[in-house]
Image: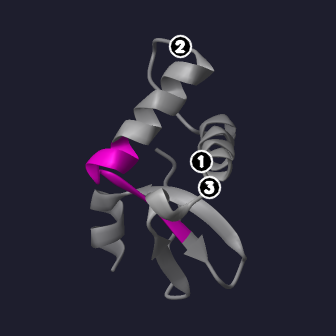
Amino acid sequence: MSSRKISENSIQIPHAQLNPGTLRALVEDFITREGTDYGAVEASLDKKVEDVMNQLRTGNAVVVFDRSTESCNIVPVKDLKRRH
């Protein structure tokens, strides 16, 4: 997952509260960002979306909204805890 600094202006948004289409668009944006690494084996977009959605469902990743930049990101929980 992308490593991005989480500011004090960030709030966690429960992914289940997002419209499914909005969540899918957020996940696809996250996946297609330059610099996001999924390893040596290339997977289809649908497989990558499924993987990220599973991480959100299992609580291994969260949606974070940064109020200062008005942007969302998906962050691994381990990174969130390390920065806060």
Kindly state the secondary structure of the residue where label 3 is placed: loop
Residue 46 included in the magenta stretch of the image:
no
**What residue do we see at 57% from left, 60% from top?**
18
Left or right: 54 as drawn, with respect to 46 = left
- The numbered dot on residue 20 is 1
Task: Compare marks 1 and 2 and give the one earlier in the sequence.
Answer: 1
**What residue do we see at 46% from left, 11% from top?**
41
**Are the two marked residues, 1 and 3, in contact with CB atoms closer than 8 angstroms?**
yes
- Measured Cα–Cα span from mark 2 to mark 3: 28 Å
Q: What is the span of residues highlighted in magenta in the rendered image?
A: 55-64
Q: Give the residue type that dot 3 points to.
A: Asn
Left or right: 57 as drawn, with respect to 3 = left
Mark 1, other Cα within 10 Å: few <14 / some 14–19 / many ≥20: few
Kindly state the secondary structure of the residue where label 1 is placed: helix
Reading the image, the residue beneath label 3 is: 19
Left or right: 47 as drawn, with respect to 51 = right
